Amino acid sequence: MNITFNEFGKPQAGALAVGVLEGGALTPAAKAIDKQGKGFLKRAIEANARFTGGTAQILELFAPPGTKATRLLAVGLGKPAALDAAGTERVGAAIAARLLTSGEKQVTLAIDRPKEAKITAEDLAARLGLGARLRSYRFDLYRTKQKKDEKPSLQKIFVQTDDVAAARRAFRPLDALADGITFTRDLVSEPANILYPAEFARRVKALEKLGLEVEILGEEEMRALKMGALIGVGEGSQHESQLVVMRWQGAKDQDAQPIAFVGKGVCFDTGGISLKPGAGMWDMKWDMAGAGAVAGLMHVLAARKAAVNAVGVLGLVENMPDGKAQRPGDVVTSMSGQTIEVLNTDAEGRLVLADAVYYTADRFKPRFMVDLATLTGAILIALGHEYAGLFADNEELAERLLAAGTAEGEKLWRMPLTDGYDKQINSPIADVKNISGGRDAGSSIGAHFIQRFTNKVPWAHLDIAGMAWSGKARPSGPEGATGFGVRLLNRLVEDHYEER
Ligand code: BES
Ligand code: MN
Ligand code: ZN
């Protein structure tokens, strides 16, 4: 979607959108258009009792009199004093969703800022653009027989604003954010026959064009580092496991201690020898969404030249059953030196993270680490598709993550860590086992396993199993990959870890 900013005035050819306040009052730009058409808009609103001007409601009028527009969308802005960044994004999203496959090629948004709004005029323009971009996302790569009327028609959005330069400036970091989220969604949407570990790594390597440094470690290098936990998971796969290290050096002091993000990248999770049931197994193509989010976040940080040193580490594997696959009961030695009894080969994400997290702590000695993982089905039972689970051993980091999640609409719910859970993963024959043996507190058990490998670096773990994929379209995007985590962590960095 192409977003451009123009001054208020003559709209471009195509569709036109104007703002209406809760209760039906027209904004000045809407009034001007209504006047040309001798009050047609006011009459239409009065005739449609269901259109109240609520946030992101749309009333669509064809060939509106007195204008050259093909159609006019009267778009609700809600109560003016409540209009904020999130509401504005929803407005942009609703317009994009309505017109995406409508046949219209372009739309002009003549939406002026209500005086009492909680958002500046330039942010309003920029957030309309962001909302429209995120909602217009599509993954149509493998649809060769799409009918013409199923294909997106909308290509250009012209956002009118008083100060074009200011709006462009406000949009730049949001455009970078949308690029990063799009990158994540593409990775997460790809099927596992296309996106196996080496291909994932190649796509991340290509981000060097943004100024990121990207290193790729293969199995030989990981063996030299003694990453027996990660390597064990990939043993049954034809595809070589990879560890990807992304670095963004944006701080003035190149030696400033970095912050670090670690992602579970299981490109496909069959469960291994502890095989999953067939029904729904296809969902496990997105078991790399944690790594996808970390890659997308690093994309954003680089594209908007964030003033921070940040590291992103991706543990990329495929978990397959095979003659060479690891068995339930096997004992592996992790890079930390701790031995792990692998009682269930389907609890593989924590094995990948054990080595990825320890490697990150050991090599970079970061200020903190946040790992993201589609780790447990149990988090879906607890929190469904509304919250990701947050586990943290550092109060400040936990508070900051919770606040960032609320601000960005990617909500987190704090879950407990406690000694009583930790004890349950002591193994009779090794240092630790990868499951407790029961179903109780499954997400906390998984988190505790990871914590054993953090080497005392302040750490948080986000279990995003319920959030990485959406079964239905939402204001922030269509059905499918959500890109969850990118916005949240970008906000965390922006609010607390950049030099000013
Ligand atoms: N990738 C799954 C978790 C998952 C389940 C993600 C559903 C998204 C949707 C993970 O590797 C897994 O299999 N976890 C097991 C752990 C168990 C064996 C302790 C689970 O949750 O059943
Ligand atoms: Mn699994
Ligand atoms: Zn998994």
Image (tube, rainbow, N blue to C red):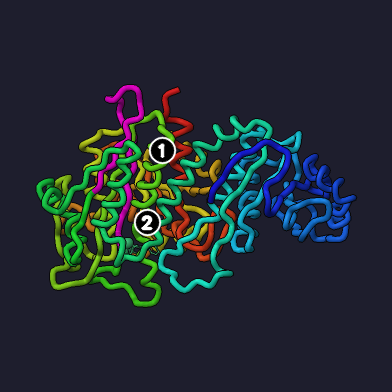
Residue at 48% across / 46% down in the picture?
A: 178
- Residue 266 among magenta residues: yes
The crowding category of the residue bearing disc 1, from other C-alpha atoms within 10 Å (few below 14, some 14 to 19, many at least 20), is: many
Considering depth in this image, is 71 or 263 the residue closer to the camera?
A: 71
Q: Reading the chain from its start, which is encountered first: label 1 or label 2? A: 2
1 or 2: mark nearer the eye: 1
Q: Quadrant of residue 59?
A: bottom right
Picture quarter with ligand 1: bottom left
Residue at 80% across / 56% down in the picture?
A: 64
| Residue 187: mark in rendering | 2
> Can you see residue 424?
no
**Placement of 151 over or under 186, stated as above or below:** below
State the residue lying farthest toward the bottom: 278
> Can you see residue 12?
yes
Q: Which residue is mark 1?
A: 303
The segment highlighted magenta reads 244-268
Type of secondary structure dominating the magenta stretch: strand
**Placement of 368 over or under 61, stated as above or below:** above
Find residue 211 and report its horizontal and vertical position in percent: 32, 36
> Which image quarter holds the C terminus?
top left
Residue at 55% across / 55% down in the picture?
A: 136
Residue at 52% across / 48% down in the picture?
A: 411
Q: Quadrant of residue 65?
A: bottom right
> Regarding mark 1 in the picture, which secondary structure is present there?
helix
| Residue 41: mark in rendering | none
Considering depth in this image, is 58 or 336 the residue closer to the camera?
A: 58
Find residue 314 and report its horizontal and vertical position in percent: 28, 49
The crowding category of the residue bearing disc 2, from other C-alpha atoms within 10 Å (few below 14, some 14 to 19, many at least 20), is: many
Find residue 135 and report its horizontal and vertical position in percent: 56, 54
